[in-house]
Image: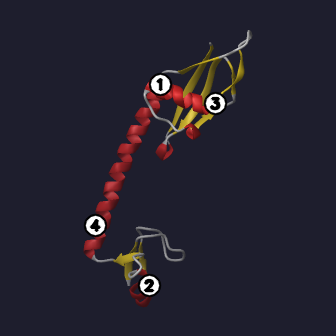
Protein backbone atom coordinates (compact mmCIF):
# COMPACT_ATOMS: atom_id res chain seq x y z
CA UNK A 1 0.00 0.00 0.00
CA UNK A 2 1.30 3.50 -0.85
CA UNK A 3 1.27 6.10 1.92
CA UNK A 4 2.46 9.68 2.35
CA UNK A 5 4.62 9.98 5.46
CA UNK A 6 3.82 12.82 7.85
CA UNK A 7 6.90 12.25 10.05
CA UNK A 8 10.36 10.80 9.57
CA UNK A 9 10.26 7.05 10.22
CA UNK A 10 13.43 5.05 10.60
CA UNK A 11 13.63 2.36 7.92
CA UNK A 12 10.63 3.74 6.02
CA UNK A 13 11.43 7.29 4.85
CA UNK A 14 11.36 11.00 5.55
CA UNK A 15 8.34 13.24 6.10
CA UNK A 16 6.56 14.10 2.84
CA UNK A 17 7.91 11.04 1.01
CA UNK A 18 5.70 8.46 -0.65
CA UNK A 19 6.48 5.00 0.70
CA UNK A 20 5.31 1.51 -0.20
CA UNK A 21 4.53 -0.37 3.02
CA UNK A 22 2.66 -3.51 3.97
CA UNK A 23 -1.08 -2.99 4.16
CA UNK A 24 -1.33 -4.28 7.74
CA UNK A 25 1.49 -1.96 8.88
CA UNK A 26 -0.30 0.99 7.29
CA UNK A 27 -3.83 0.15 8.53
CA UNK A 28 -2.88 -0.96 12.06
CA UNK A 29 0.04 1.32 12.91
CA UNK A 30 0.76 4.26 10.59
CA UNK A 31 -2.75 5.54 9.82
CA UNK A 32 -4.29 5.29 13.34
CA UNK A 33 -1.31 7.10 14.90
CA UNK A 34 -1.33 9.86 12.27
CA UNK A 35 2.19 9.02 11.09
CA UNK A 36 1.04 8.67 7.48
CA UNK A 37 -1.94 9.15 5.21
CA UNK A 38 -3.14 7.12 2.28
CA UNK A 39 -1.64 8.17 -1.06
CA UNK A 40 -4.84 9.06 -2.91
CA UNK A 41 -4.87 11.49 -5.81
CA UNK A 42 -6.44 14.20 -3.61
CA UNK A 43 -3.84 13.75 -0.87
CA UNK A 44 -1.03 13.79 -3.45
CA UNK A 45 -2.24 17.06 -4.99
CA UNK A 46 -2.62 18.56 -1.51
CA UNK A 47 0.95 17.56 -0.69
CA UNK A 48 2.22 19.18 -3.91
CA UNK A 49 0.34 22.38 -3.05
CA UNK A 50 1.97 22.44 0.39
CA UNK A 51 5.41 21.90 -1.15
CA UNK A 52 4.87 24.71 -3.65
CA UNK A 53 3.73 27.08 -0.88
CA UNK A 54 6.77 26.16 1.25
CA UNK A 55 9.08 26.78 -1.72
CA UNK A 56 7.55 30.21 -2.35
CA UNK A 57 7.83 31.05 1.36
CA UNK A 58 11.49 29.97 1.44
CA UNK A 59 12.32 32.00 -1.69
CA UNK A 60 10.73 35.10 -0.18
CA UNK A 61 12.60 34.58 3.12
CA UNK A 62 15.87 34.05 1.23
CA UNK A 63 15.39 37.32 -0.69
CA UNK A 64 14.61 39.18 2.56
CA UNK A 65 17.71 37.74 4.25
CA UNK A 66 19.95 38.70 1.31
CA UNK A 67 18.57 42.24 1.39
CA UNK A 68 19.16 42.34 5.16
CA UNK A 69 22.75 41.14 4.64
CA UNK A 70 23.45 43.97 2.16
CA UNK A 71 21.93 46.52 4.59
CA UNK A 72 24.12 45.25 7.43
CA UNK A 73 27.26 45.27 5.29
CA UNK A 74 26.63 48.75 3.88
CA UNK A 75 27.72 50.69 6.96
CA UNK A 76 29.92 49.78 9.90
CA UNK A 77 28.53 49.24 13.39
CA UNK A 78 29.98 51.95 15.61
CA UNK A 79 30.68 51.28 19.28
CA UNK A 80 32.23 53.57 21.86
CA UNK A 81 34.24 51.94 24.65
CA UNK A 82 36.65 53.03 27.35
CA UNK A 83 40.22 52.72 26.16
CA UNK A 84 43.74 53.50 27.28
CA UNK A 85 46.24 55.80 25.59
CA UNK A 86 47.37 53.34 22.94
CA UNK A 87 43.85 52.29 21.95
CA UNK A 88 43.71 49.19 24.09
CA UNK A 89 40.25 48.67 25.59
CA UNK A 90 39.53 48.10 29.25
CA UNK A 91 37.91 44.69 28.66
CA UNK A 92 36.49 43.67 25.31
CA UNK A 93 33.50 44.41 23.12
CA UNK A 94 30.99 41.58 23.47
CA UNK A 95 28.50 40.13 21.01
CA UNK A 96 25.69 41.52 23.16
CA UNK A 97 27.10 45.04 22.79
CA UNK A 98 27.35 44.55 19.03
CA UNK A 99 23.74 43.28 18.86
CA UNK A 100 22.57 46.31 20.88
CA UNK A 101 24.48 48.67 18.57
CA UNK A 102 22.95 47.04 15.48
CA UNK A 103 19.48 47.44 17.01
CA UNK A 104 20.15 51.12 17.80
CA UNK A 105 21.86 52.09 14.53
CA UNK A 106 20.18 49.87 11.93
CA UNK A 107 16.87 49.09 13.64
CA UNK A 108 17.45 45.35 13.10
CA UNK A 109 17.00 42.75 15.84
CA UNK A 110 19.89 40.25 15.77
CA UNK A 111 20.47 37.37 18.19
CA UNK A 112 23.88 37.78 19.83
CA UNK A 113 24.62 34.08 19.35
CA UNK A 114 24.52 34.52 15.56
CA UNK A 115 27.35 37.07 15.58
CA UNK A 116 30.84 35.70 14.92
CA UNK A 117 33.99 37.78 15.11
CA UNK A 118 37.28 36.89 13.45
CA UNK A 119 39.11 37.76 16.68
CA UNK A 120 38.11 39.23 20.05
CA UNK A 121 37.65 43.01 19.92
CA UNK A 122 40.16 44.35 22.46
CA UNK A 123 41.33 47.51 20.73
CA UNK A 124 40.03 50.53 18.85
CA UNK A 125 39.68 50.51 15.09
CA UNK A 126 37.83 48.37 12.56
CA UNK A 127 37.21 44.69 13.19
CA UNK A 128 35.65 42.20 10.75
CA UNK A 129 32.89 39.81 11.66
CA UNK A 130 29.87 38.01 10.27
CA UNK A 131 26.27 37.31 11.19
CA UNK A 132 24.62 33.99 10.36
CA UNK A 133 21.11 34.59 9.04
CA UNK A 134 18.49 31.90 8.26
CA UNK A 135 18.75 29.76 5.10
CA UNK A 136 22.54 29.91 5.04
CA UNK A 137 22.88 33.64 4.33
CA UNK A 138 25.94 35.22 5.95
CA UNK A 139 26.21 38.99 6.40
CA UNK A 140 29.72 40.47 6.61
CA UNK A 141 29.96 43.34 9.08
CA UNK A 142 32.58 45.82 10.21
CA UNK A 143 32.65 46.78 13.90
CA UNK A 144 34.22 50.22 14.34
CA UNK A 145 35.36 50.79 17.92
CA UNK A 146 36.35 54.24 19.08
CA UNK A 147 37.54 55.55 22.45
CA UNK A 148 34.96 57.13 24.68
Q: Looking at the rendering, which quadrant does residue 132 occupy?
A: top right
Location of the N terminus (image quadrant): bottom left
| Mark found first going from the N terminus, 3 or 1 | 3
Neighbour class for label 1 at 10 Å: few (<14), some, many (≥20)? few
Q: Could you say whether the residue bearing mark 1 is in a helix, strand or loop?
A: helix
Q: Which residue is mark 3?
A: 94
Neighbour class for label 4 at 10 Å: few (<14), some, many (≥20)? few
Q: Which residue is mark 4?
A: 46
State the separation of the CA atoms marked 3 and 2. 52 Å
Location of the C terminus (image quadrant): top right
Q: Which residue is mark 2?
A: 29
- Colour option used: secondary structure
The front one of 105 and 137 is 105
Q: Could you say whether the residue bearing mark 3 is in a helix, strand or loop?
A: loop
Q: Residue at x 47, y 69 (%)?
A: 14
| Contact (Cβ within 8 Å) of mark 2 with mark 4 | no
Q: Which residue is mark 1?
A: 104
Q: Residue at x 53, y 29 (%)?
A: 100
| Mark found first going from the N terminus, 4 or 1 | 4
- Mark 4 or mark 1: which is in front? 1
Residue 129: x %, y % from top left = 60, 30
Residue 103: x %, y % from top left = 47, 29
Amino acid sequence: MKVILRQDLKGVGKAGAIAEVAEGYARNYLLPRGLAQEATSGNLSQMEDRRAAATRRDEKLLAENRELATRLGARPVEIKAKAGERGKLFGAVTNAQIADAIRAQHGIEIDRHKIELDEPVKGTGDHAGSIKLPLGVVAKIIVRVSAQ
